Image: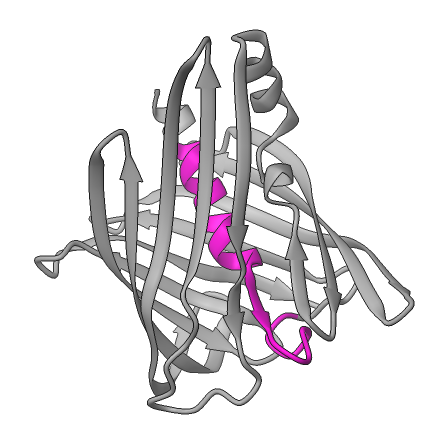
C-alpha cells in the first residue's frame, strides 16, 4: 500500500514539475537540453525523506517549428529501492507545451490495471508560466482529471489548481545550489469519490532551471510535505 501511495505521489509531483512551461517561449523556465538532469527529493511533514525522483532528458528533436523531448524518470523510495522507471514525452511550440499525461503512469502499473479489467483515461490542461513573470501577477488556473472504470464501477479523480499568484522574488538554497526564484502561491483541490482535499501550495521557480522547491500545507497552515531540487546539471 505504501509503495503504491509513493508511486502515485511521485506521479503527481511529476505533473507539477513537467507541466510547468513558459508561454510564447517554452524553454525559458525549462531547459530542453539533451543530457540535462534533475533530481527532486520528497520530504514528509517531519522532514524525513519519502522518496527521490530522477529526471533526465534523453532526446530532443526539432521539426517544423516544434521541439519534442523525452524524459527518463526513475523513482526510488526512502530505502533506496526502485519503485518504477518510465519515460515521458512532451512537445513544445510557440503555443506552449503539449503533455502526454498517460505516459506519466509506468507501463507496469498500466498493465496491472488492464489485467484487472480497469479502464483509465487521463486528461488535463497545462500549468502555464508566462515569460513576463512579475510580483503581483495572477496566473491561469489548471486541472488534471483521471477517470477509472472497473466492470461498470466508475471512479473519477480531479485536481484543480486555482488562485495562482506571483507573491515575490527571493533567493532559495537547496542541495543543488542557490537560485533566484519567483514564489508562486496557489490552491489545489482534489476530489475523489465524494471526498475533497484542499491544500495551499508554494512553488519556487528559477529561470533556466524550472521548479526549485515546492511546499504543501493543510488549510490550517500545517506543513504536509515539501519537494526540493537536490541535483541539477545541463
Q: In the image, 81: left or right of 135?
A: right
x and y percent of residue 218 in the render? 16, 54
User: Above or below — where is 94 with respect to 155?
Assistant: below
Is the C terminus in the top left, top right, bottom left or bottom right quadrant? bottom right
Residue at point 27%, 29% (across, down)? 193
Q: In the image, 27: left or right of 117?
A: right
Q: In the image, 21: left or right of 175?
A: right
Asked where in the image residue 145 lies, by quadrant, the reply is top left
Please give the range of residues in magenta.
6-30
Residue lying at the far right of the rendered structure: 63
User: Above or below — where is 104 with respect to 113?
Assistant: below
Total marks shown come to 0
Is the N terminus in the top left, top right, bottom left or bottom right quadrant? top left
Residue in front for this viewpoint, 211 or 229: 211
Tell me which colouring the rendered structure shows. Answer: one colour
x and y percent of residue 226 in the render? 32, 56
Q: In the image, 174: left or right of 32?
A: left
Residue at point 43%, 54% (across, down)? 143
x and y percent of residue 221 in the render? 12, 61
Residue at point 58%, 48% (across, down)? 54
Asked where in the image residue 38 lies, by quadrant, the reply is bottom right
Residue in front for this viewpoint, 214 or 39: 214
Residue lying at the far left of the rendered structure: 220
x and y percent of residue 15 in the render? 50, 51
Residue at point 39%, 49% (across, down)? 42
User: Above or below — where is 162 with respect to 136?
Assistant: above
Residue in front for this viewpoint, 119 or 6: 119
Magenta-span inclusion, residue 162 = no
Amino acid at each position: 500500500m505504501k509503495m503504491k501511495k509513493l508511486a502515485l505521489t511521485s506521479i503527481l509531483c511529476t505533473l507539477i514539475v513537467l507541466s510547468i512551461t513558459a508561454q510564447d517561449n517554452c524553454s525559458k523556465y525549462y531547459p530542453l537540453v539533451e543530457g540535462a538532469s534533475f533530481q527532486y527529493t520528497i520530504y514528509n511533514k517531519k522532514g524525513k525523506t519519502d522518496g527521490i525522483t530522477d529526471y533526465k532528458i534523453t532526446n530532443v528533436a526539432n521539426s517544423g517549428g516544434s521541439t519534442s523531448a523525452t524524459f527518463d524518470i526513475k523513482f526510488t523510495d526512502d530505502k533506496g529501492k526502485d519503485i518504477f522507471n518510465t519515460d515521458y514525452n512532451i512537445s513544445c511550440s510557440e503555443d506552449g507545451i503539449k503533455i502526454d499525461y498517460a505516459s506519466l503512469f509506468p507501463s507496469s502499473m498500466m498493465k496491472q490495471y488492464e489485467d484487472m479489467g480497469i479502464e483509465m483515461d487521463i486528461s488535463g490542461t497545462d500549468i502555464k508560466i508566462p515569460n513576463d513573470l512579475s510580483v503581483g501577477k495572477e496566473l491561469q488556473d489548471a486541472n488534471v482529471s483521471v477517470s477509472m472504470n472497473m466492470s461498470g464501477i466508475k471512479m473519477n479523480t480531479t485536481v484543480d489548481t486555482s488562485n495562482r499568484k506571483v507573491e515575490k522574488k527571493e533567493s532559495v538554497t537547496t542541495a543543488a545550489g542557490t537560485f533566484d526564484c519567483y514564489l508562486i502561491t496557489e490552491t489545489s483541490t482534489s476530489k475523489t469519490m465524494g471526498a475533497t482535499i484542499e491544500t495551499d501550495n508554494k512553488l519556487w521557480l528559477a529561470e533556466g532551471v524550472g521548479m526549485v522547491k515546492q511546499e504543501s500545507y493543510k488549510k490550517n497552515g500545517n506543513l504536509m510535505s515539501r519537494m526540493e531540487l537536490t541535483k541539477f546539471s545541463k
